[in-house]
Every structure is written in C-alpha cells, then in structure tokens.
Amino acid sequence: MSQARTGPIVGVLAGAGIVVSLMQTLVVPLIPDLPKLLHTTAANASWAITATLLAGAVATPVLGRLGDMYGKRRILLASLTMLVIGSLICGFSNSLAPMVIGRALQGVGAGVIPLGISIMRDELPPQKLGSSMALMSSSLGIGGAFGLPLSAVIAQNASWHALFWISAALGAVIAAAVFFLVPESPVRSGGRFDVVGAIGLTIGLVALLLTISKGSDWGWGSGTTLGTLAVAVVVLPVWGWWELRTQQPLVDLRTSARRQVLMTNLASVVIGFAMYAMSLVSPQLLQMPTATGYGLGQSMVAAGLWMAPAGLVMMLLSPISAKLSRAKGPKVSLLVGAVIITAGYLSALALMGHAWGVLVFSCLISGGIAFAYAAMPALIMGAVPVSETAAANGLNTLMRSIGTSSSSAVIGVVLAHMTTDFHGHVLPSESGFRTAFMIGAGAAVAAALVTLAIPGVRRAITGGGADAGGAGGVGGQAGSKDGTAQAATAEGATAK
C-alpha cells in the first residue's frame, strides 16, 4: 500500500483514538457541579463517571471479538455511532438517568483503540506498522491530556451541554472519515459468538470494577462492597472454566496464558495504575490554595494548560519508541518506559512545589507512558494469530482499565485519609501527595520487574503474522496480503 494511501488511514484511526480518549476527561470540570446540574446527590452523580468506566471495560473485549468475526471497520463504526448517540443523549439531558445512559454509550467507544490497532496490522505495510501502532496506542494518553484544558475552557465559557454537543460532532466527523477512508480488513476469524462467555464476563467485570471504584463510597467492609466482590470471585473463575471448554471462546485463555501475553497484560495493569495516579494527583496539587503552603493556586483552565504539554510529549515520543522497538525489541521499549515513569515520580518529590515542576515531571511520566503504551500492542500481536488480534488487543486494553480503576481507588483512599484542616475544609495533605507519588513510583518499578519476566523479543512485529512459540503460524499466513506473510515470519516478533 502506498504512502499516500496509508497516511489517511493512520491519521483517521489515531484521530478516532484521541476523540474516544477525550471522553475520559470530558466531565472532569463538571464533577463539583454535577449534583446541582443533575438535581441529585454527589454519590448518585458519580455514576456519570462510573458508567463510562464499566461500559468501556465490558465493551472492549466483546467488540474486539466481534471485530475479529464480522469485520473490524464495521464494529469500529458501530462503536463510534454509540459514542455519538451517547453524546447527544448527554447533551440534551438535565437529570441523572439519561446522563448515566449517555455516558455508558460513550464508554462503548473504548473499543475503538484496540480495533484501530488491529486494522493497522491488517492494512499497513511492515515499515509503517510499528510507528503507526505506537501512535494509536498512545492516543489514549494524548486525548486525555488535551481534553482537560479544552473541556475546562468550554465549561467556563459556554453551557455545559456544549461539551457533549462538541463530542458528538467530533465523533460524527471521525465516523465519516473512517467510512470513506479506512478499508475493511479481509481478515476474519468467523465462527459463532460466545454469548454465555460475554454474559459471564460482563457480570464478573462489572462486579469487580464496582468493588474497586465504589468501595470507598460504600465502605470497604460494607455488605454491598463485600457482596459485589463475592460475585466477582465466584463468577470470574466459572467464566474462565467455560472459556477453556467452549470451542469458540470470547477470549482464548490458552493464548492469553502464554508467557509473553500474560506478562504483557500484567505489565499493562501496573502501567495503567501508574499513568492514572499522575492524572489524579497533579490537577489537585495545581489547584490547591497557595495558603496551604504546598498548593499552587491554579485555576482549572490553568491547571489543564500546565498539563497539556504532556500529551504533546506522548505524541512526539511515540515514533521514537517504535524505532527503539524495531531496533531492540518491544520488551526493551516497555522496560525503558517503566524506568522513565519511575524517574518521573521520584523527581516529583523534589519538583512538586512549583507549577513548572509539575509540567516537568508530568512530561517525564508521560514520556515513559508513551514508550510503554507503544510497546504493548507489538508484544501482544507478536504472540497471537492474526485472526485474534482485535480480541487480544481488547483484552490488553481491559487490563489497562483495571489498572486505572485500581489506581483511582488506591490514590483516592490515600488522599482521603492523609488530610489537613484548611479553614474548616478537609484537604489532602502534603504528605498525602508525596505518598501518592511514591505509590506511582512503586507501580512503575513493579512494571519493570514484570517486563523482565517477558520472554526476550528480538524484533518488533512488522507484518501480518507472528510466530511466537507457534502463536502466529497458520493465522499469520491466512491474514497476510501481497506476500507479507513471509516478511512477517522473517521480521515479526519472535520469542527466544
């Protein structure tokens, strides 16, 4: 495929990833005002955040499997359509129920990123694949970083509904671009959809993520929290038993248990944890009153602008990460990313007293995330058949979501319990922020240790197939086009 043809495909798919990731920070400026805007309590208003998380976590592996079966572009368009419908519902809502429904539909858009990466594997020439996957994978952080200041400016200068009307317009434009510019992949796995597996995964994931995300509000020892945890503990092993015994599983757990896939997914959990810790702590530190002695006194818009360069850093470093993966292997890129993230959190302990210091350490952490996020799809696709790439990438994205949800819960508990009294208001203390930074550094160190356990991967995946301990074999040949199967065998990711 020519450069003139691949450029629009990469641009449109990366744009889709950025638009989807904007949904994560879209409502951040509204969080303090949501109870009043929706005429409800603060606890109920938080469902506008939780609904997106739950829907995205469940939809991502399901949409990945549907994409492998029925066409990745088709399912990607369906995902974007749900995002647009959800945005319109939110844009016209003034109460809790339609807002939660709309936000859940927006969450379905989370499947766009793994589907986009899989389309790239099927459509792009080997020399373009690494950098394109790196950009697509990093779009999750890029959109999140740019979304905060953008949404803050819109929320302060227009009706809050405008946030959702604009997101609907962006989603519609990207969907049209995908329809006209992105070809449908000919690679299909076929088979029958695993309805039982999808229901089991939905119940187990919702129970697990509700326990993690709402446990602090409900009380960690409450009957509700323990009940949802019990459901997760019972349902997920039963779901795993079913997946191992059905002929056409929603998630191929045998492939997922391969050391390269398993260790990469574990690394994704802790990298996701480390990424979200910065997103939670830095805005609060920037907006804390200066009279506390450690707050930086910035407005929401100013805080967003101080953090926005981090998204630009991710965009600029993604192709560099791809080059490193091509030269030394994606395992090295992931390890470098984890080390940089660790350095960023440790530097935060010295730089947290200045707004420019927050900019420096947030850019450093984001740079490490760019290396890590760019390496993960290459590691995953180097170990699975080409007919299962969307499902495998969907599972990997789910692992990141579990990491970010866990980070929200852990950092939330730390900042809620390590507090100081400021003129009658309870605020997170300086030691609370420092502890959060140390936890983020610890997560990054854990990611580095997990990465060392990944089998040595000599080269980044560059073609339509993979041969990682036999993972790619037949699937790689079936999914190749224009003779790239041989290139993939020669140049693809291989396990030592």
Image: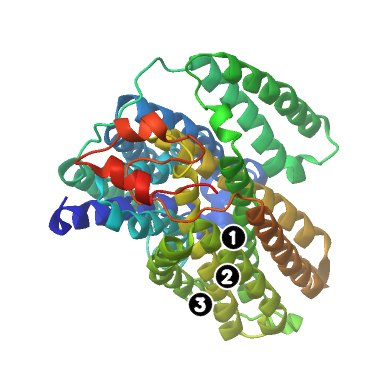
Q: What element carries label 2?
A: helix
- How would you rate the neighbour count of disc 1 (Cα within 10 Å): few for under 14, some for 14-19, many for 20 or more? many
Instruction: Provide the residue designation for mark 2.
Output: 365
Residue drawn where x is 50% and y is 64% of the image: 371
Alpha carbons under labels 1 and 3: distance apart: 17 Å
Q: Nearer the viewer, residue 26 or 291?
A: 26
Is label 3 in a helix, a strand or a loop?
helix
Which of marks 3 and 1 precedes in the sequence? Answer: 1
Q: Which residue: 68% across, 18% down?
A: 238
Q: Give the Cα separation between the discs numbered 2 and 3.
A: 14 Å
From the image, state whether disc 1 or disc 3 is nearer to you. 1
Q: Can the viewer see residue 185?
A: yes
Q: Mark 3 points at which residue?
A: 306
Q: What amino acid is labelled 3 in the image?
A: Trp
Q: What residue type is labelled 2?
A: Ile
Horizontal placement of 446 versus 9: left or right?
Answer: right
- Dot 2 or dot 1: first in sequence order is 1
Residue 223 or residue 388, whichever sits in front: 388
Q: Would you say the residues marked 1 and 3 are in contact, meaning their CB atoms lie under 8 Å apart?
A: no
User: Residue 91: where, in percent of width, then height?
Assistant: 37, 45
Res 225 quadrant in image: top right
Res. 483 image quadrant:
top left
Determine whether 430 is above or below 82 in the image: below
Pinpoint residue 494: horizontal percent, then vertical percent: 47, 47
Side of 271 relative to 165 (left or right): right
Q: Which amino acid does label 1 sit on?
A: Met
Which residue carries the number 1 mark? 275
2 vs 3, front mark: 2
Residue 20 location (% of width, % of height): 40, 49
Front-lying residue, 145 or 259 = 259
**Residue 217: x, y in percent?**
74, 44
The reply to whether the C-beta atoms of the residues labelled 2 and 3 are less than 8 Å apart is no
